[in-house]
């Protein structure tokens, strides 16, 4: 799909009154989702688009207040004394009728009470059973068509807190996926053997360019085919379970900064999909070149490992590492995804704009995807270790154990993802389970010792592989690691070791 706007340099197409003030004021922005990461100087991205339509209520970034003698908020009595972010937090305490009443007091309170995030929270909390998506969270909550919503013009309301989500939701994000520097490019492989994967690729991201084209789901699925079959089936999208037909309506008609993302772990059961191998008539199967998944020895005690993903353009995943030091593959069925990836180790800083707790157990990625790209993309792109690529329909991206990744849907699309433990990463997974029990996730409560369970099961089924993993765990190179050492250390100056990517021990050998 072509970008929605012709990219132009800088922000030169912004309405005149917003242009000068937007960049300086963005540095002071806080998101009301959480703390703001330290912002670097914000450089307009090369080729970044600028065609942001005027805000429907006429709201402008706060910098514009300096050149205006009129200010709606100043007329809002004592409310005017509250910083915008605090005012929004207070409004989060109100119910819908109170928001409507308060919005009748003055233009400023009208504009604040229209903030979509307030209505989204109210609507999601109310867990409505039967509803129609009406285009905005407020219209949906009030059960009115979006075109019947009032639009009182508030041309002297200058607020970053209100303008930022609108700006982020209307910024064309395609340019961020373009002009990928050569050294950052994620390798694209048309055929990869299991041997090559184990020898050279277990610790590297790559895109397999044609492995899923044979999958029945690839041939059959698009959102209308899914709608025909599963219209009333409820799928999980973040905090809600919505029938597919409502989610698809939402997907096709929303202007959220961070659209609700369908991410369902129980899809195979809900959709009656046969699983297994190609030979057994499965609906899809793991790319054979990735080899065995050693977590399969856990049987029904394994943490959830497969998800159906669906979302509109601009949806996606903020920076994170996959759980329990597992690797993953992510297959695009329809649409396309931009991936921004970084290796991790105890000696490397986290990606720019990402905050890591001291024990590295918690990754905080406070910004929305759009805000991250606007603020940090050019810095991220210049940071050693950065890898970027676009995964198209029919392709599969490999996420190596321990890598940070941010994923943006460039178009509306459907994907399948699976976490797995390849042989070459067994040492990392064993070390994670043994040494970071507080960070282990996804096991059911009755599994009190995931490390012990995994070692037992592996010992019963694959004693040699367990031995190999144990050698890796103790920091001694096993056969696979020995063979892949040179290759892994040849990654932009980084070396990858066992145990959450900590290479210190290994290098001391
Ligand atoms: O949004 C996506 O497709 C990426 C999903 C992902 O990273 C994950 O499932 O861990
Ligand atoms: Fe992930």
Image (cartoon, rainbow, N blue to C red):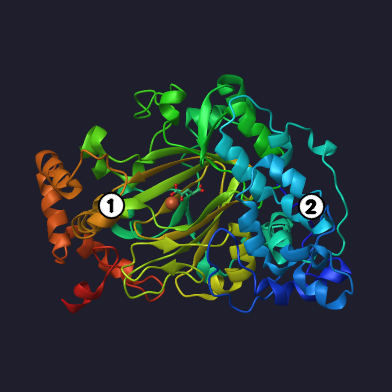
Give above or below for 170 relative to 351: above
Give above or below for 306 relative to 193: above
Q: Give me the residue at 68% from left, 64% from top.
A: 84
- Give x and y (percent) for residue 427: 21, 57
- Screen quadrant of the C terminus: bottom left
- Give x and y (percent) for residue 199: 29, 58
373 or 148, which is in the foreground? 148
Q: Give me the residue at 81% from left, 68% from top.
A: 74
491 or 444, which is in the foreground? 444
* Quarter occupied by residue 201: bottom left
Marks 2 and 1, how far apart at CA: 46 Å
In the displayed structure image, the side of residue 127 where residue 411 appears, left or right? right
Where residue 110 is drawn, which disc sits there?
2
In the displayed structure image, the side of residue 466 where residue 40 appears, left or right? right
Q: Residue furthest front?
A: 78
Give above or below for 123 relative to 476: above
Q: Which residue is mark 1?
A: 440
């Amino acid at each position: 799909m072509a970008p929605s706007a012709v990219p132009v340099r800088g922000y030169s197409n912004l309405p005149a009154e917003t242009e000068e003030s937007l960049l300086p004021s963005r540095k002071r922005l806080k998101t009301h989702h959480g703390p703001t990461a330290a912002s670097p100087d914000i450089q307009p991205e090369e080729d970044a688009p600028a065609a942001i339509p005027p805000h429907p209520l006429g709201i402008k970034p706060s910098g514009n207040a300096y050149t205006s003698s009129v200010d709606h908020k100043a007329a809002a009595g004592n409310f005017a004394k509250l910083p915008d972010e605090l005012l929004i937090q207070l409004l989060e305490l109100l119910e819908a009728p109170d928001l409507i009443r308060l919005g009748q007091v003055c233009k400023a309170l009208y504009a604040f009470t229209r903030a979509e995030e307030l209505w989204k929270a109210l609507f999601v909390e109310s867990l409505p059973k039967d509803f129609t998506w009406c285009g905005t969270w407020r219209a949906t909550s009030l059960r009115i068509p979006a075109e019947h919503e009032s639009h009182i013009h508030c041309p002297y309301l200058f607020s970053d807190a209100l303008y930022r989500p609108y700006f982020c939701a209307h910024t064309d994000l395609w340019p961020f996926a373009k002009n990928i520097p050569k050294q950052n490019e994620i390798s694209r492989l048309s055929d990869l053997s299991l041997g090559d994967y184990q020898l050279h690729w277990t610790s590297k991201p790559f895109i397999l360019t044609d492995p899923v084209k044979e999958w029945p789901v690839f041939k059959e699925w698009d959102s209308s085919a899914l709608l025909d079959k599963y219209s009333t089936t409820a799928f999980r999208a973040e905090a809600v379970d919505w029938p597919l037909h409502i989610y698809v309506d939402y997907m096709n008609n929303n202007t959220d900064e961070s659209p609700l993302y369908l991410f369902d772990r129980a899809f195979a059961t809900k959709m009656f999909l046969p699983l297994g191998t190609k030979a057994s008539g499965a609906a899809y199967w793991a790319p054979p070149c990735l080899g065995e998944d050693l977590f399969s020895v856990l049987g029904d005690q394994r943490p959830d490992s497969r998800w159906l993903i669906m979302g509109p353009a601009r949806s996606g995943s903020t920076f994170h590492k996959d759980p329990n030091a597992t690797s993953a593959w992510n297959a695009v069925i329809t649409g396309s995804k931009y991936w921004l990836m970084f290796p991790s180790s105890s000696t490397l800083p986290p990606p720019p704009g990402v905050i890591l707790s001291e024990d590295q157990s918690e990754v905080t990625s406070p910004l929305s995807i759009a805000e991250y790209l606007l603020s940090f993309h050019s810095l991220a792109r210049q940071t050693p270790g950065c890898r970027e690529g676009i995964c198209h329909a029919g392709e599969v991206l490999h996420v190596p154990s321990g890598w940070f990744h941010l994923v943006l849907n460039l178009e509306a699309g459907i994907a399948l993802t699976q976490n797995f433990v390849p042989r070459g990463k067994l040492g990392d997974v064993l070390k994670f389970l043994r040494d970071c029990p507080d960070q282990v996730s996804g096991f059911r409560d009755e599994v009190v010792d995931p490390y012990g369970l995994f070692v037992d099961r592996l010992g019963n089924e694959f004693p040699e592989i367990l031995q190999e993993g144990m050698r890796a765990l103790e920091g001694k190179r096993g056969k696979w690691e020995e063979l892949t050492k040179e290759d892994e250390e040849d990654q932009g100056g980084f070396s990858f070791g066992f145990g959450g990517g900590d290479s210190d021990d290994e290098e001391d050998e």
